[in-house]
Amino acid sequence: MQILNGKTAIITGATRGIGHGIALAFAKAGANIAFTYVSSDEKALALEKELSAFGIKAKGYKSDAGNHKAADEFVTAVVTEFGTVDVLVNNAGITRDTLLMRMSEQQWDEVMNANLKSVFNLTKAVQRPMLKARKGSIINMSSVVGVKGNAGQSNYAASKAGIIGFSKSVALELGSRNIRCNAIAPGFIETEMTAALDEKTVQGWRDAIPLKRGGTVEDVANLTLFLASDMSAYITGQCINVCGGMLT
């Protein structure tokens, strides 16, 4: 069902993991997609080809979402190329995990810049086309760590908690213009990164989850697709956990 047919979506960090799953779901649903990446041109071109196979327009932009000027220029380029922006998915993020006593200022700043400032930069930039159209959906990727905290991840947890507060504030500011803003908090999602971990450790995490499994990128992508579509037209200012009941 092409519930995003004719819409243009921006997705940051779409070349791997959850971002890749979201991009595929959006392409199958009929959305034209502009995505950012920071390193591999080869992966970006491969993703463009993969998404275009669904009959939609897809284009990658080498851009650092954590850089305010670059983010603004990126959105301007997307509007010029695609005509408008209907959906923004702020997915890009990094970790620099360590205990607070060992955490450097650089490790704190890098995470805040990539995870939280990037959300500010792109949300501010897409306001213009969305306000002009008097519609839009902004979806920000938080984490259950931003809800409950986690030892060794104070920088990551702070950035993801900040995303929740930011999303609620944007929802209040832009709701009168029919622009919605929601956050998603994934739990333990199994990706290529978790595949490299010790199986016994991973199984222990699965056993602690009420649904007795890790989440898939599709689990997160399905919610993102719903929030991007008109099916969620009366949902804004929410943080929805995708965690298999982990936080229950």
Image: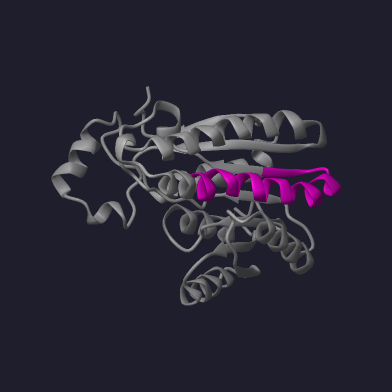
* Residue under the image location 53 percent in, 76 percent down: 45
* Residue under the image location 77 percent in, 58 percent down: 84
Among the 4 quarters of the image, the one containing residue 138: top right
Residue 2's x, y, as percent?
Answer: 63, 55
Residue 184's x, y, as percent?
Answer: 51, 38
Q: Is residue 242 visible?
A: no
Taking depth in this image into account, of 74 and 223 the one nearest to the observer is 74
Residue 190's x, y, as percent?
Answer: 32, 49
- Tell me the magenta residue range: 112-137
Q: Is residue 206 visible?
A: yes
Asked whether residue 118 is drawn in magenta, I would say: yes
* Residue under the image location 72 percent in, 62 percent down: 73
Eyeballing the image, is 215 above or below 45?
above
Name the side, left or right, on which 217 lies relative to 27: left
Q: How is the image coloured?
A: one colour
The main secondary structure of the magenta stretch is: helix
- Quarter of the figure with the C terminus: top left
